[in-house]
Structure formats: structure tokens, C-alpha cells
Image (spheres, helix red, strand yellow):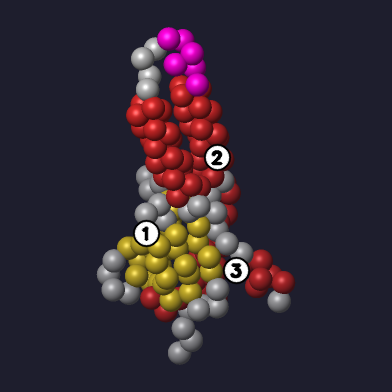
Amino acid sequence: MADRAELHRPFRPRAARGVSWVLGALTVLGALAVIVMLPAAGVDYGPADAAGTAALAVLICWFLSRQGGVSARPDEDGLHVRNLIHSRDVGWAEIVSLGFGDGTPWAQLDLTDGSTLAVMAIQRADGEHGHAEARRLATLIALHEPRD
């Protein structure tokens, strides 16, 4: 049953997570540098400016944390997809097919209601890892296909 457990491990992008962490660190360091160095350099930079800089840094870091937290968590009942803004639970029976065609930045699920759902956790930017993860999700979909 270890193989089944391995199939059900969470999907997470590699490149987007790394980039998000690096940009978050640079944002914090940059904001701190602006808040500390501009007044020291004699620039007219008051408390409201510092608060605005800090608020902007917090907003950017929130966005980056959402990007870095993109995932898809499979279980025996279905798939919990956490994308940049929205999260959604999809039962295995609701999934018709998986698309990861040319030009799409991430995998997409075709659903029984006629809609599609992006799975941002499986990204083309991850190269072969992204393709391997798409194959793993396709295997999970087939594994949980309703039996007649």
C-alpha cells in the first residue's frame, strides 16, 4: 500500500515556491532598507511614508505566500485544489479528464459540469517534474475512476 500512499502525496510546484521565497525575502530586505536608509540619507521620509512602505511590503509578501502555497492535495474522496486566490474540493467522480497541453502554464481538469479547473500546483515551468506530476495525477484519476 506504500505505492498508493506515494501516489496520494500533495502536489506542489517547485519553481514558483522557490521564486516566491526569494522575492519575499528581497521584499522584506528592500522595505527595511528604504525605511532605515532614506531618513539617514536626509531624505524627507516621515512615519506615514514608512508605514506605507511597510504596508506595501506586507501586501506583496501576502501575495507571494499565496503563490508559494499553491497545492493540490489528493485523498480517497477527491482533490483539494488551492490556487492563487480560490480553493476548491473536487470529488474524483467530478473529474472527466486532465489536460496539460502545449501552451498551458499549468494542468487543467475538465469537470462533469462542463467547467475547467486550473491546478496551478502542476506547472509547465517545472519542466520534467511538472510532466511527471501531471502523469501522477492522471494515474490517480484513473485509479479513482468509477467502476460500472
Counting from the top left corner in percent of width and height, residue 143 is at 55, 75
State the SS at label 2: helix
Question: From the image, which quarter does the C terminus lie in?
Answer: bottom left
Question: Where is residue 5, by image quadrant?
Answer: bottom right
Mark found first going from the N terminus, 3 or 2: 3
For disc 1, the marked residue is 86
Mark 3 vs mark 2, foreground winner is: 2
Could you tell me the amino acid type at mark 1?
A: His
Provide residue 91's location: percent of width, then percent of height.
43, 76
Q: Tell me if residue 106 comes above or below residue 34 in the rendering.
A: below
Q: Nearer the viewer, residue 109 or 42?
A: 42
Front of the two marks 1 and 3? 1
Asked if residue 58 can be seen in this view, the reply is yes
Tag shown at residue 8: 3
| Dots 1, 3 in contact, CB < 8 A | no
For residue 21, the mark is 2
Secondary element under disc 3, as helix, strand or loop, is loop
Coordinates of residue 80 in the picture (x, y in percent)? 47, 67
